[in-house]
Amino acid sequence: MELIWHNAKRMILLWYTCCMQGAARDSDSLSGREKAYEFLKDTILADPEMQGRFISEQDVANQIGVSRTPIREALLLLAAEDLVQLMPKKGAYVAPLSSRQISELMELRGVVERYAAERTMSEGTVPLRQMQELVEQQRFLVEDARQFIDVDRQFHALLVAATGNELLTKTYEGLRARQVRAGVVALYRAHGRQQAVIDEHNEIVAALESGDVGAATAAITAHLDTTLKVLLSG
């Protein structure tokens, strides 16, 4: 019965998400919900100190200047994506990523990113210059974990987008919140991880530029495996 109830709640949340996204709302309400959604997803959920804590709707409303209604709507959307857990009379809980969730995230990223490397190298669409520019940006962001990881995400997403496969790109984009959360946690757990990430990114770029598909996929695998070990070491 518990499993049936869990699945029923999941279906209700997904149905509500579709209705929310497809319904015609006035522009103020829509912008408020979107603003709350982006803030919660990119700022609150990415904060390592929020892991294992409840989100204060009023605090979030005060920070971004909206009422609590769009906050609640945004939390329903995030719950449908399994990014927060809604608990009766308690609110929205930010559960820390489990070892299984982290492992599955890195496994999926590996599948997508290695394919992207193979595809773009075979078609000559590797965005080398843009990827190199992002690595250079990271050199100036070693003291800002949140911005560093945002550029990190862009680095990998750029390669995936270069495949020209829109469905694959959207699927990868759907990992953004989890990717940022895991990335920021990894930086906090390993001293000097920022420089190591820059070095690993340079190895990926060098392998892509060399035209050696095996070296490129191996560099991506090594980078993700190292991040996984850091995340599981805590």
Image (cartoon, rainbow, N blue to C red):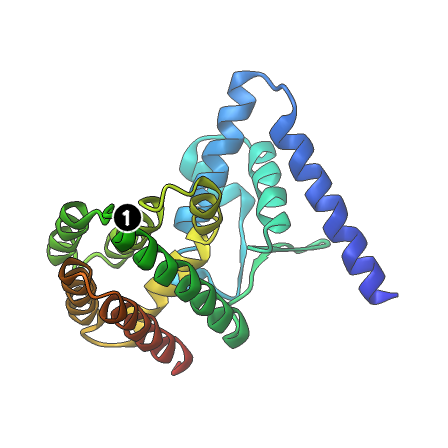
Identify the residue under disc 1: 123
Q: Residue at x 15, y 55 (%)?
A: 135
Q: Is residue 83 above or below residue 130?
A: below
Residue furthest out toward the right: 1
Q: Residue 90: horizontal and vertical position, in percent?
A: 66, 56
Lateral position of residue 157 relative to residue 76, left or right: left
Q: Residue 67: horizontal and vertical position, in percent?
A: 54, 31
Lateral position of residue 151 relative to residue 65, left or right: left
Q: Secondary structure at mark 1?
A: helix
Q: Residue 44: horizontal and vertical position, in percent?
A: 43, 51
Closest to the observer, 20 or 188? 20
Q: Residue 169: horizontal and vertical position, in percent?
A: 42, 45
Q: Residue at x 38, y 83 (%)?
A: 233
Lateral position of residue 187 relative to residue 176, left or right: left
Q: Residue at x 18, y 61 (%)?
A: 211
Lateral position of residue 169 relative to residue 57, left or right: left
The quadrant of the picture occupied by the C terminus is bottom left
Q: Is residue 166 above or below residue 160?
A: above
Q: Residue at x 55, y 55 (%)?
A: 83
Choose top left, top right, bottom left or bottom right for residue 23.
top right
Residue furthest out toward the front: 122
The quadrant of the picture occupied by the N terminus is bottom right
